Image (tube, rainbow, N blue to C red):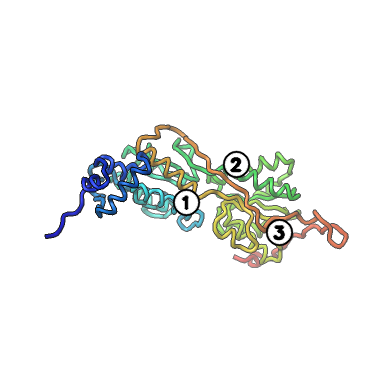
Amino acid sequence: MQKPPPKIKDVAHVAGVSTATVSRALTQPDRLSEATRAKVFDAIEVTGYRVNAAARNLRTRRAGAVLVLVPNLGNPFFSAILSSMNDVLSANGYSVLVFDSQQPGASEQAVADCVLNGSVDGMISLDGDMSDATAMALRGANMMQNVVFCCEWSDQWPLPSIRSNNDLGTRLAVDHLVARGHRRIAHIAGPQDNILAQVRKASFLQRCATHGLDIRPDWVVPGDFSLGAGAQAADRILAMTPRPTGIFCASDAMALSFVARCKQRGVTVPDDISVVGFDDIEMAAFAEPGLTTIRQDRAGLGRLAVQELLARLRGEQKTEGAHIIYAPVTLIERGTTASPPGAGLVNGRTDPEPQPIEFPTPDDKPA
């Protein structure tokens, strides 16, 4: 005769605790001491007890899942954040549903369906451009109090926000270039309608003004955080007279492709032009030369966002409005920054002014 599967009372008996304590160890482990948690989980291993997630969710009216909205799953910036979120949520008994919020088609309807049919308990949005349809679905499901912004945010929706200190990061980048003698500094910006791009651009202009730098309007070059935008910006900047000697890019992707295009055009980084990025994605350390950049604690952002959401799901965090938590940023100096041309002597004379690179025809510019 087949032995019946172990029950929660069997775990409690082996651990020498109440069934309520076993339940708490599975659903709210942080409320128990480390010693008690260890006894419960040792007993689970001994008895072979397995949680019936479907039954538990019916009893607790809990879906056991969290929805994460990402504006572009192809962007390597988000990998460490998502991995960190998954680790913390899994450890707390939640699965993760990831949607690309910029995916054309039925993405808004899919999000609304997921929320309204009770498939998730809460949501973390890495996209500050939350649509009205998504907001209506969250309100309809009475879930707006269980939503947290991470990285990006929206002033339209006063919700908890976990973000890097973008203003400080930008100031560190500008200060780094100025400390090396750069006075002509350009900025490759992100999308005009993106909150991160707006903050970094405004901080760039303000910090340059603090240093008494005269920034020409054409030295602020539009971009969209992508590789292609960095290469296109390089074509424009390398053709300028006078040419900026230092570049602050609003993303590492643009910085890396800027450096690559410089190499294609025979311009040496950092001897001819210095470049600073923002993010410190994995490729930044392995590029040649290594990219000087502003490091965001991406894993930390993910952890903080999940911790904030879990506190709300447990009723422990009741703060309403734009509750902001800043994650630290750090300047990581590598090989793409140095003193500008003209700062030293070459064969007893000052380095010559860099000459603009001309593109005879539009077809001459690599795609």
Q: Do the residues bearing badges 3 and 1 touch, measured as CB atoms within 8 Å?
A: no
Residue 304 in the image, given as x and y percentages of width and height: 46, 43
In the image, is residue 351 above or below residue 135?
below
Check disc 3: other Cα within 10 Å, few if <14, some if 14-19, many if 20+: some
Q: At numbered mark 2, what does the secondary structure look like: helix, strand or loop? A: helix
Q: Which residue is mark 2?
A: 167
Q: Amino acid at mark 1?
A: Ile
Relative vertical location of residue 322 with respect to residue 339 in this rendering, above or below: above
The residue identified by callout 3 is 270
Of labels 2 and 1, the one closer to you:
1
Q: Is residue 133 visible?
A: no
Q: CA distance from mark 3 to mark 2?
A: 25 Å
The front one of 322 and 156 is 322
The C terminus - image quarter? bottom right
**Lower sequence index among marks 2 and 1:** 1
- Look at label 2 and name its amino acid: Asp
Judged from the image, the secondary structure of the residue bearing numbered disc 1 is helix
User: Residue 109: percent from the left, percent from the top?
Assistant: 34, 49
Hey, what amino acid is under mark 3? Pro
Label 3's element?
A: loop
Q: Give the residue displayed 36% in from the left and 39% down from the top.
A: 31
In the picture as drawn, the residue positioned furthest to the left comes out as 1
Q: Which mark is residue 81?
A: 1
Q: CA distance from mark 2 to mark 1?
A: 20 Å
Whole-Å distance between the Cαs marked 3 and 1? 30 Å
Q: Residue furthest right?
A: 348
Mark 3 or mark 2, earlier in chain:
2
Between residues 201 and 211, which one lies in front from this camera angle?
Answer: 211
Circles 3 and 2, Cβ within 8 Å, touching? The answer is no
Examine the image and state in which quarter residue 335 appears. Answer: bottom right
Q: Earlier in the sequence, mark 3 or mark 1?
A: 1
